[in-house]
Image (cartoon, rainbow, N blue to C red):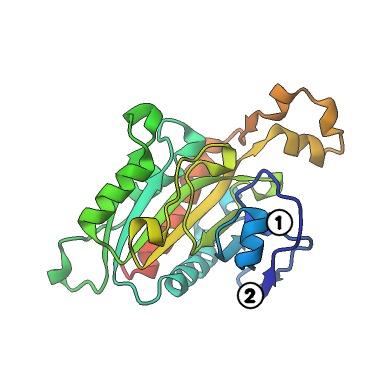
Amino acid sequence: MTERISDKTEQRTDMAVELLEKEPRFRNRSGVKKTEVVVDARLSRRLNRPKGRYITLECAAPLSARREKYKPLIDDMAAVIRSLCEGCDSFLAVGVGNPLLTADALGSRTVSLLKTNRGLSSRGFSRELSAFSPGVSGVTGIESVDVVKSITSFVKPDCVIVIDSLASAAVSRLGTAFQLCDSGLVPGSGVGGGSGALSASSLKVKRVLSVGVPLVVYAETIVREAGAAVSEIPENVRNLLVTPKDIDLLMSECAHIIAEAINAALGL
């Protein structure tokens, strides 16, 4: 099912599905909810989102931390990745974010679980995968966008897969809503950061696919969902970023799911 984004006021979120006036979705036989949001040129300008397809897979299984329940979600995610990366044979996975902060370590944890095989093409692999994590400028002194551009120019992949933690405007989506997008990513944009876009044009590759899951919400989101007036909350409290108490386990499980889906999609 495909729906266009409504003319809704922008929220503090990375999730395109949260910009819909009404959330269309369907539950498939595996119990995973799938929504596709199409951003065209007009809506891109109005909502300050890159043009492209934003596909959200929602499933509560990661909250259980029972990996035997993950297969339907992994299979659906792998199918979406294959669809968005059609025609690509070589891949570079990039885990952006700060590995020293648990809620921001999704990218680095995911790439550590991937089955990289660059340089092993003679062993019968039909697709090539390499992976790395650039860190953050506060630690390295180098903007992650610049590091990714440099490595990409050396590796020359067909497709770059960027993995990052996201911010949501709904507490219920923490750790349960996986967004895949074919328009790239601006690292840190959901929490007020971001210094440049990772896109097909900026990296000079065929495709850039971003994969992420929200692991933080703003305190004002919790206040709003509780029915209180956000205007009555001090701004310094409103701008606090909040994570689940079991964020270390949730982040690890989400990284496992994304890594397994990428490995499956590439036949590794």
Q: Position of residue 263 (x, y in %)?
A: 36, 63
Is residue 59 visible to the viewer in this orientation of the structure?
no
Left or right: residue 36 compared with residue 109? right
Q: Is residue 228 left or right of residue 191?
A: right
Quadrant location of the N terminus?
A: bottom right
Location of mark 1 (residue): 19
Q: Residue at x 56, y 56 (%)?
A: 178
- The quarter of the picture where residue 145 lies is top left
Choose between 88 and 40: the one closer to the eye: 40
Q: Amino acid at mark 1?
A: Leu
- Closer mark to the observer between disc 2 and disc 1: 1
Farthest residue to the left: give it.
Answer: 122
Residue appearing at x 50%, y 66% in the figure: 77
Which numbered marker is on residue 212? Answer: none
Callout 2 secondary element? loop
Q: Is 109 left or right of 194, judged from the image as shown?
A: left
Looking at the image, residue 53 lies above or below residue 226: below
Element on which disc 1 rests: helix
Judge whether 74 appears above or below 103 on screen.
below
Q: Is residue 205 toward the left or the right of residue 245 in the image?
A: left
- How far from the left and from the top, in percent, is residue 207? 39, 66
Q: Which mark is residue 29?
A: 2
Q: CA distance from mark 2 to mark 1?
A: 26 Å
Residue 267 visible in the shown view: yes
Position of residue 13 measured from the top left corner of the image (x, y, whole percent): 64, 46
* Amino acid residing under circle 2: Arg
Nearest the viewer among 121 and 201 is 201
Residue visible at 48% across and 64% down?
A: 182
Based on the displayed image, in which of its 4 quarters is residue 220 positioned? top right
User: Looking at the image, do the residues carrying marks 2 and 1 touch, with CB atoms under 8 Å apart?
Assistant: no
Q: Earlier in the sequence, mark 2 or mark 1?
A: 1
- Residue drawn at x 22%, y 57% is 155
